[in-house]
Amino acid sequence: MAKQAPFKNLDPATAGDARRKGSDPHELDQSMEVMLSYIYASLPDFPLYDGRRLPPALAAPDGADRLTRLPRELRRKIVSRLPVKDAARTAALSWRWRTIWHSTPLVLIDAHLLPKGQGFPPTYSTSSPPVAAAVSSILEAHPGPFSCVHLVCSRMGAHRAQLARWLQLLAAKGVQDLVLVNRPWPRDVPLPATLLSASTLTRLYLGLWKLPGAAALRGASLPHLRELGLCCVEMEHGDIDSLVARSPVLEILNILACFKGLRLRLVSQSLRCLQISGGIMENVAVVKAPNLERLILYGCCSPGGGLCTRVRIGDAPKLHTFGYLEPVHVLEIRDTIIMPGMKASTRTMLTSVKILSLNVRFGVRNDVKMVPTFLRCFPNVERLHIMSQKCDKPTAGNLTLKFWEDSGPIDNIVSRVNTVSLREFKGEPGEVGFLEFLFRSARVLKTATIVMANPSFTPFLKDVAFSKVRRSSRNMASKSCEVHVLGSNGPDGGEVWSFKTGADFSFQDPFSVAEVLGRC
């Protein structure tokens, strides 16, 4: 029998407990690894030098130490961009460098403290004790302030006393940008309420914790917090509402994989971007958000018991970008639930939305019947993005061009939509029927991008699908439209949504295939 790889996330006690309960600890370990990979991909970047060597032209030909002659402020900026070990070692260069590290706002990334030869992410056996001890030493030694601290390598269930001291020091020494991820198990280590006294925070990301109780949250004060990320965090209903209410300048709220059914009642004068990815979502109500520009819901599933995810948009006059809306969502605009086939009225329209993304199972009749109704709720949409979702049990019948023609004209398709993308295209009849309707109706369409599914995961004939796109585009209402057909090398169902893309306001359209790929 081949020897199995060591656990990356489980301690021996947890692995033994899993076996006693009849579970495979290696499967549990792998699921934790997948969860952590999503969390790490969702974290913000840190401001450090990437380690590339300087070009020879910048090196001193005579070997002279010209760095030391630089002004003190410039040397502080250099040190602030070095990994923490290298930054601390600059004190040994000369007396001119000795005080630089202590007077420079600290940038601490604990992944740089892993033992030599250990890659990232760490395994169970190589992460905690050495890294935790080094973090404690650095936080005690440096006087602050702490401009950027990422602590993502330690199993904090085994270091709770150290965790409490870290948060005390971080709060006292003015931490601004903090990322704190617990290496499971357990995945619900209680987060000390001390963190909520860190009034200097401008950005906070938490992964695999249990939020403090309601009393601690009511006493929180985060007056400078502009970005908050909660990744696989255990919390009670109302906890996020409390954090938002105590963050008066919060602009970006990202939520990844809520384990319990998420119920969010959003009231915020400052929030510009709300993103929820994965996990269970019961109810998201945008009650009053006068500055909300982007609402992005990706891969959220409905809770058990036959309940559907409800999305209610109340007062959001600046909402410009909305996705990934699905026909299985119960959409409520103001006080009206949107039903298939209903006539649009001023009470059921969101006129501010210009960019819309829909997830549609073109093989499911009830999904497709909701699409015209949804489109009529957003009369000023100019950029439309459709993700064709996989359908295991088709029920659609023959949803061809005739279905769309019988549904009647859709004004924004006819006279406003200038950019369209259809992703995960396989050439199925429902997809082709929609594409034909779109091309024959859209008079001002300038760009249409069709992205084929990856045939490695979804069996279909690419040549046949490509010929269907060409045939669909023969009778186009717009004579100036460019049609681009691309292939995908991504996973089944398309790439996982990136918080970084959605929260980057330099992207005019975060759903645009062309714009996002152009930055890569």
Image: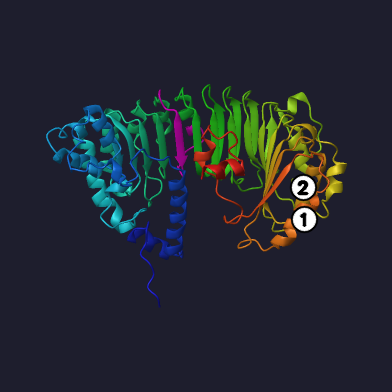
Q: Which of 339 and 12 is in front in this view?
A: 339
Image position, residue 2 (x, y; %): 40, 75
Which numbered marker is on residue 468?
A: 1
Which numbered marker is on residue 20?
A: none
Query: Is 316 left, or right, of 175 in this rendering?
Result: right
Inspect the magenta stretch and tell me whether residue 61 lies in it. no
Residue 356 drawn above or below residue 345: below
Q: Do the residues labelled 1 and 2 touch (CB within 8 Å)?
A: yes
Q: Nearer the viewer, residue 15 or 225?
A: 225
- Disc 2 element: helix
Sort mark 1 into few (<14), some (14-19) or many (20+) by Cα contacts within 10 Å.
Answer: some
Q: Which of 309 and 447 is in front in this view?
A: 447
**Residue 394 visible within the image:** no
* Residue ID at (62%, 45%): 302
* Residue ID at (78%, 55%): 429
Q: Which amino acid does label 2 sit on?
A: Leu
Q: What residue type is labelled 1?
A: Lys
Read off the magenta span. 223-240
Which numbered marker is on residue 435?
A: 2
**Residue 267 visible within the image:** yes
Q: Main secondary structure of the magenta part?
A: loop
